[in-house]
């Protein structure tokens, strides 16, 4: 059974931090590059960070580089996104999925950054 469950979102002020978590099915998690995506109101979903299956390499969208850090714990089938120095433009629903994504999305977790 496919499982992608995101958590950890919330409301923070500009400059604040949040840590998102993603609990995934082992069948998806262990063999895939995994990523964090986000979708802001009126915009398309975008990939903001991804990490290789072994966790040894990560990449970031330019808009979040040096502020966000992606990591994964393969023993727990869990992925994280540490978000620092948050900006209002980071406001979005955040999702985790494989890269490229499978045809299933979790409910996401809302991140709202107030100015």
Image (spheres, grey):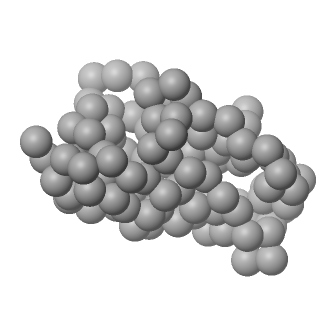
Which residue is the extreme one toward the left? Answer: 115
- The reply to whether residue 112 is visible in this rendering is no
Locate the C terminus and report the quarter of the image it occupies: top left
Residue 69 image position (x, y, % from top left): 56, 51
Residue 78 image position (x, y, % from top left): 66, 68
Kindly identify the residue that appears in the image at 58 percent across and 61 percent down: 80
Which residue is the extreme one toward the bottom? Answer: 76
Kindly identify the residue that appears in the image at 39 percent across and 34 percent down: 39
Locate the N terminus and report the quarter of the image it occupies: bottom right
- The reply to whether residue 99 is visible in this rendering is yes
Which residue is the extreme one toward the front? Answer: 66
Of 5 and 67, nearer the camera is 67
Of 11 and 95, nearer the camera is 11
Q: Vertically, is 92 above or below 43?
A: below
Kindly identify the residue that appears in the image at 31 percent across and 46 percent down: 86
Residue 73 image position (x, y, % from top left): 73, 70
Of 85 and 61, nearer the camera is 85
Left or right of residue 67: residue 90: left
Of 95 and 112, nearer the camera is 112
Number of marks present in the image shown: 0
Residue 31 image position (x, y, % from top left): 89, 53
Kindly identify the residue that appears in the image at 24 percent across and 50 percent down: 15
């Amino acid at each position: 059974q496919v499982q992608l469950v995101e958590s950890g979102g919330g409301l923070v002020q500009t400059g604040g931090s949040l840590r998102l978590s993603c609990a995934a099915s082992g069948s998806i998690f262990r063999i895939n590059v995994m990523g964090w995506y986000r979708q802001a109101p009126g915009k398309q979903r975008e990939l903001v960070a991804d990490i290789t299956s072994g966790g040894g390499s990560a990449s970031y969208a330019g808009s979040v580089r040096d502020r966000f850090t992606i990591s994964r714990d393969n023993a727990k089938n869990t992925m994280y996104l540490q978000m620092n120095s948050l900006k209002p433009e980071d406001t979005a629903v955040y999702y985790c999925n494989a890269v490229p994504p499978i045809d299933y999305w979790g409910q996401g977790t809302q991140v709202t950054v107030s100015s």
